[in-house]
Amino acid sequence: MMTTTREEAGPLAVEAALERIRKTHGHVPEGFRILAEHAPDAFLGYMGLREFVFRAPPEGHLEIWTTEFIFVLLDIQAGNIRGARNHLSNAMRAGLTIGQLTEGLVQLIMVGGITAWNMGGREILEFALEIERESRPSPG
């Protein structure tokens, strides 16, 4: 079994990809950091998919908030609540509203049943309400 080293994958390409993640999230999540360190070729392959999906119009067809929102719902259904929280923060910074989130969560219940709500949907809505409260200007 052959492992690709960071040098073989191109250290500048890996560092540039990590910087793009840093710009999106405000930091590099540990999962990305360790993948980039130990399997840089796989990390760069993943980044190719990620960059395709996160193209804003006119290159892409979905607004960034919509792409992030889709990942929120997919992550909840997959049981990846940490990922859903990360994507929710990004989606709300990009314009997702509580109303839009709520409608999507109801669709999630239609697909995944009440278990999807209990396993993550409710937590994500509560987290969104917390984000909204913290982003409101303080009175006076």
Image (cartoon, grey):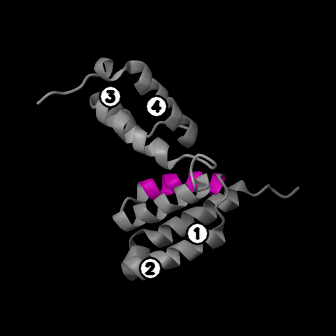
Element at badge 1?
helix
Element at badge 2?
helix
Question: Which residue in the structure is indicated by mark 4?
Answer: 17
Gap between marks 4 and 3, in whole Å?
Answer: 12 Å
Figure quadrant of the N terminus: top left
Report the residue that reaches farthest toward the left: 1
Residue 44 belongs to the span the image colors magenta: no
Q: Position of residue 59 (x, y in %)?
A: 59, 46
Check disc 2 and give the amino acid type: Ile
Mark number displayed over residue 90: none
Mark number displayed over residue 101: 1
Up/down of 71 relative to 17, above or below: below
The residues colored magenta run 83-93
Up/down of 122 relative to 15, above or below: below
Residue 91 belongs to the span the image colors magenta: yes
In the image shown, does 29 or 2 lie closer to the viewer?
Answer: 2
Tag in front: 4 or 1: 4
Q: Position of residue 109 (x, y in %)?
A: 44, 79
- Could you tell which of marks 2 and 1 lies nearer the N-terminus? 1
Element at badge 3?
helix
- Could you tell which of marks 4 and 2 lies nearer the N-terminus? 4
**Crowding near the residue tagged with mark 4, few <14, some 14–19, many ≥20 C-alpha atoms within 10 Å:** some
Question: Which residue in the structure is indicated by mark 2?
Answer: 109
Element at badge 4?
helix
Quadrant location of residue 9? top left
Q: Is residue 30 visible?
A: no
Gap between marks 3 and 2, in whole Å?
Answer: 38 Å
In the image shown, does 34 or 1 lie closer to the viewer?
Answer: 1
Up/down of 13 relative to 117, above or below: above
